[in-house]
Image (spheres, rainbow, N blue to C red):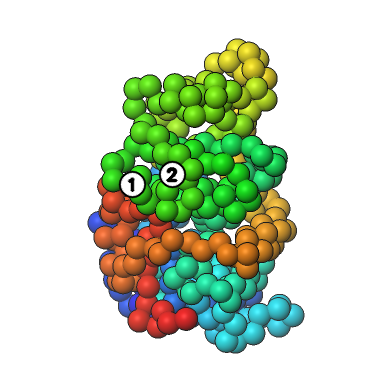
Amino acid sequence: MRALVLSALDGPDALHWSEVPDPDPGTRVVIDVRAAGVSYPDLLLTQGRYQLKAAPPFVPGSEVAGVVVSAPPGTPWRPGDRVCAATPFGGYAETATAAPDRVWPLPPELTFVEGAALPTNYYTAHFALVRRGRIESGETVLVLGPAGGVGTATIQIARALGHRVIAVVHRSGADEFLRGIGADDVVRLGEGWAATVRELTGGRGVDLVVDPVGGDAFDDAIRVLAPEGRLVVLGFAGGNIPTVKVNRLLLRNVSVVGAGWGELVRTDPSALAVVSDAVADLVRAGLRPPPPVEFPLAEGAGALRALAAGEILGKAVLVTPRRQT
């Protein structure tokens, strides 16, 4: 089979489209890959900057959608099943394997390309909003980094759950896209953005902030929380890891909580089925990822470079010639 092999921890430029041996299935499910999601952790992994480490050469790629080729006896999977899977390595290949408990049915309403957008972004968003953010009926959500994959998913999940969403965006040209996927208000990240948010909320502030960015916006994000509001930290795509002046938490009884989806699944694999079922329910009710930006599988390096440059609105997905639904 062919795959994108990372030869050194030098980022996307070290990826090479190569012929490699078929993976050894062992006790894993073998999947004919039709589409593979491109995520920010994949980018960090190629640079050696992610918490999960692998020594080159290896095949990156943490999320796929495709068709089951084979599965161990005693598992629910059968050849021909349409599935999504978390790999967490090896997804950028024509064939991938996954542990049986990291595989779940691809909702029949979705294409393979749409399905490849689910595992990292939509499951993370649901986990952040519901389990970690403990969102309640009628609350308002503010999303930082809203034009990226996790931000896009957070907007859509929050809207699907019936909440008002304010998107605070840095990159230009994304306003129409964000409103199109469900943002009620779009605020430009810059001087005075927090005051604008307070105006939009009648001075009260927002109940929940979802922050995959970190960096300079973090302090103002705490300031725009309503009394007993929560800020959920997903990551630090902005580069800087902020610190918390805990006296600010006391002033309005606000909280800062972490949401590490990958770590939760590692320690509690049963959480994957709970969240995947919840997202599947939203899909049945009408949730659809916006059309991902597609790249041929062999051009995955270009997709990661585009992601690093902030050129992807929503989600990038690598597709194979067999991508048909």
**Of 184 and 268, the residue lying toward us:** 184
**Of 320 and 267, the residue lying toward us:** 320
Task: Place residue 7 in its image quadrant.
Answer: bottom left
**Does residue 71 appear to the left or right of 298 in the view shown?**
right
Q: Which mark is residue 263?
A: none
**Does residue 227 appear to the left or right of 198 in the view shown?**
right
| Placement of 99 over or under 207, stated as above or below | below
Q: Which of marks 2 and 1 is nearer the N terminus?
A: 2
How far across and down, in percent of the image, does residue 174 sit?
Answer: 33, 46
Distance CA(mark 2)–CA(mark 1)? 9 Å
Q: Which mark is residue 174?
A: 1
How far across and down, in percent of the image, does residue 203 sit?
Answer: 54, 21
Residue at the spot 68% in from the left edge and 51% down from the top edge: 267
> Considering the numbered disc 2 on the image, is that residue within a helix, a strand or a loop?
loop
Task: Place residue 324 in its image quadrant.
Answer: bottom left
Residue at the spot 48% in from the left edge and 61% down from the top edge: 289
Kindly indicate whether the residue at mark 1 contacts the one at mark 2 (C-beta within 8 angstroms).
yes
Disc 1 residue type (three-letter): Ala
Disc 2 residue type (three-letter): Pro
**Of 180 and 233, the residue lying toward us:** 180
- Can see residue 315? yes
Residue at the spot 51% in from the left edge and 68% down from the top edge: 115
Q: Which mark is residue 146?
A: 2
> Considering the numbered disc 1 on the image, is that residue within a helix, a strand or a loop?
loop
How far across and down, in percent of the image, does residue 241 sit?
Answer: 45, 30
| Placement of 165 over or under 108, stated as above or below | above
